Amino acid sequence: MLRYGEPQVAIAVVFGVLAVTIAVATLVIAVHAKEDVPYDDVSRTGYRLRRPWLAFLCGLGVVAVGFSFFLLPYASGGGDTRTVKVSGGQFYWTIDPAVLPAHREVRFDVTSVDVNHGFGVYDPKGRLIGSVQAMPGYTNELELTFDDTGEYRIRCFEYCGLSHHNMVASFRVEER
Amino acid sequence: MEAHAAATVLHRDGTELLATARLSDRRVAWLFVCTGLALFCVMGLAGLAMRLSQAEVFTLSPSWFYRLMTLHGAGMLVGALLAMMGALWFVLRTTVPLHVGRMLASYLAIVGGAVLVVIAVLLGGFAAGWTFLWPLPFDSFGAWRPWAGDTFLVGMLLVGAGFFVFCLDLLMQTTAAYGGLQRALGISYLRNRDDSPPPPAAIAAMVVSIEGLLASAAGTTIVVALIGHAIDSGLELDALWAKNLTYFFGHSVANLIIYLAAGAVYVMLPGYTGRPWKTTKPIVVAWLFTLLFVATAYSHHLYMDFVQPEWAQGFSSIASFGAALPPAVVTIFTGVVLVWGSRYRWTLASTLLYLGFMGWAIGGTGAVIDSLIPINFKFHNTLWVPAHFHTYLLMGVIFWAFALFVRLLEESAGQTAREGVSAFALGALLVGGYGFVGAWYVSGALGIPRRWAVHPEGTAGYSLAASIFVIVFALGVLVLLLECLRLARVASVYRWDRVPASRAALPAVRDGEPLLTTGFQFAAVSAAAIVFLGSFAPSITDATLDSVRYHHLQHAAQFLVGLLVGAAFASTPAVFARIRRHPNVGVALVVAAPAVMLLVMLPSIYESMEGNDWVHLLYHLGMTALGVVTGLAAGTLGLVTGRLVLVLSIGMALMYAAGVTGG
């Protein structure tokens, strides 16, 4: 069974609020569209509002994109990291080792022996942690630290052929 | 009576689109918009079948599910593209003398390509997805026959070629109509050197055409490389390179559909507001930023390919956010200013047009959220992705396509769609459409992967809800089409010429310029050609034989020699005077010659010649000859388009050399 991850719910709620705001704005503008207002008045007000609107969006962009750069999922390397070799093939995963320690950083070296695949990791409660692509000829390094013990499910996240949806696997995380 | 009829379907100060359209303009618009919407309806049914299967209402075999998925993706892309190409072409032709023959050639290539895709999928079982990511088309596990993959690729090549021709004509004619690149892009106006800037639709056309040529060049390169592998299985591609080119092509074309639509909306909206959409400096700046951001944002498709250089990921993140600013601050914002207090004329067409802005804004918001890398880590390739692009394509672009379709019918009939019927259709489209994409947003937050024939256990309910909403949406489309049929019957009473076709002559354009206009340019090109002649040196050939990449780089240099010689030759007064009269031949050759240059760069062809120095030299001279042909042909396209073609064709050779790794 899948479960909603907390970040995903928060993001979906933010999006939902924004979408409803846009819909309400669309409705309000539609109501005012029926009125007869001299265009000079509308354009004067509109252009006066445009600069702060641009400044707001630019500020939002700098904050959001800037903050996101501190949370990149890309491997930083170094440290006491346990390496796991992951290889995708039509339509299976090999994960070595398949039993991993909790509370310790693990680096997945993810590659593919044939076509592109996606290594999507779900925690024991069924919440999506994240994904990384498995690409032939390349190794993508994904660093994760697991706090929950139990069975983690893997689902393929890049379309790879007719049994793409059957390309599932798992590994265990245990206290050591 | 006609003035009264115009007032019925439009704002009292609005102008009928048909009034300024020639007969040929109308025919082209009907052809493209009807074909696009017909494809949309058929592919929509394929999409509904997939959702019902995921909802476990009935079971499609994985083979058929993924075949339909491939068909749906490629077909929808082609459908929306055709509809919006026709829309922009139609509204632009009052000010730019776009070429009917080239537009029809483009149509035939794209539709021909789509037919090949249908054959590959339905008869050959091809199911690698419309993204055809290397090497999946060739690793089917026996699911489809090799010819099916080859047919699909040739089909996509034709689609790319058709779009390339469309963009070539758009760029050639718009720059010719407005007197060069800077004037046509509005840069001269921005710098206070031009008092009469082009209309916003022309600036949009410039940006779309430049981006479209870039995207088509990248698409041609990757598709020809894949066809090369189909011919010579020893030819190997770099997977990261292939992914970059595939997504540069796919992302750009999907984005350009929206920008084609935006160009048409600039002309359509004033019909209902009675206020003209004029070119302003913010509009020019917005489109210049769009030019930059559309070309650089594509890398967000590779966020989860951690080997992609981090600077590219970072820049893509900035560009993806930045790409939202021009619509949010200029196009949508100005649309609001035009609508507010305008006594907006509400009809079925104008409401569809208005609601399309909402779809664009909501879908864009979903896209921007997903473009932040840490968020993409949680949402990449989940159902959040089809959720956001369906929001702006289905609830934005398709609404606009229907808006144009209905408007042309309303103008032809001299009456609007009936209010009650319109309200029902719009209600069904809104409830069905947003319910449908809403189910996907929720499913994406739940972490359901996209492109799965069978969803994870316990999640079929989301697909069932989505399917019900799709059926409601389809009902809305059906009612809308039935009302359109009624309007068409009324229009036929007037023999479709209630508004007489315009007999105005095509706008005049300035004479084209040769590629090289100064002695210095001739000297520089000649010097460069002499330098690159060094690529023929036997020592260079010997040194590159051990590396496919370097050997192909040598071929690129030899092609460049020909390109420079051809360009110089084409710019001499005597030659230019002759070739300038044959731009159609030029268009055909600049499409074909670079593709042939890539296609013959097959180790199985040139390796067999390496034993004989003279034969090998002849092959290398052939590369140069193809360059000469491309250079000469580019000379017929005018200074701006011709030079861009020169850059793109050598760019294709270099891209190919960079990514083809083995033979």
Image: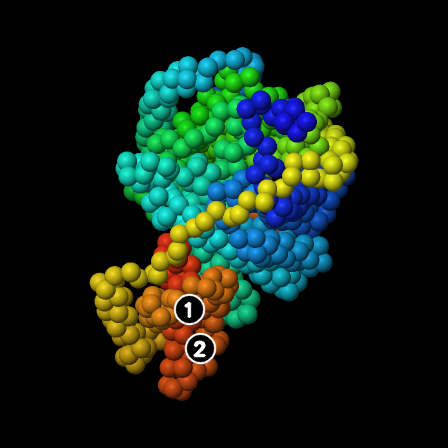
Residue B594 x/y as whole percent: 45, 65
Position above or below: A86 against B488: below
Q: Are marks 2 and 1 in contact (CB under 8 Å)?
A: no
Q: Position of residue B388 (x, y in %)?
A: 54, 33
Location of the C terminus of chain B by quadrant is: bottom left
> Relative to residue A161, is residue A130 drawn left or right?
left
Quickly name the residue at label 1: B578
Q: Are marks 2 and 1 on the same chain?
A: yes
Residue B100 visible in the picture: yes
The image quarter in which residue B446 lies: top right
**Three-letter amino acid code of the residue under disc 2:** Tyr
Instruction: Tell me which residue sits at (69%, 39%) in the image.
Output: B497
Depicted B592 relative to depicted B641: above or below: below
Residue marked by disc 2: B606
> Which of the two discs, 2 and 1, sits closer to the camera?
1
| Residue B219, percent from left and from top | 48, 55
Residue depicted at x 30% and y 62%: B516
Indicate left or right for A10 with B191 as reference: right
Mark with earlier residue (2, 1): 1
The foreground one among A99 and B254 is B254
Q: Helix, strand or loop at disc 2? A: helix
Instruction: Report the chain holding disc 2.
Output: B
Q: Please, what is the three-letter code of the amino acid marked with disc 1?
A: Arg
How busy is the neighbourhood of tag 1: few (under 14 within 10 Å), some, or many (20 plus)?
A: few
Q: Quadrant of the N terminus of chain B?
A: top right
- Label 1 is found on which chain of the structure? B
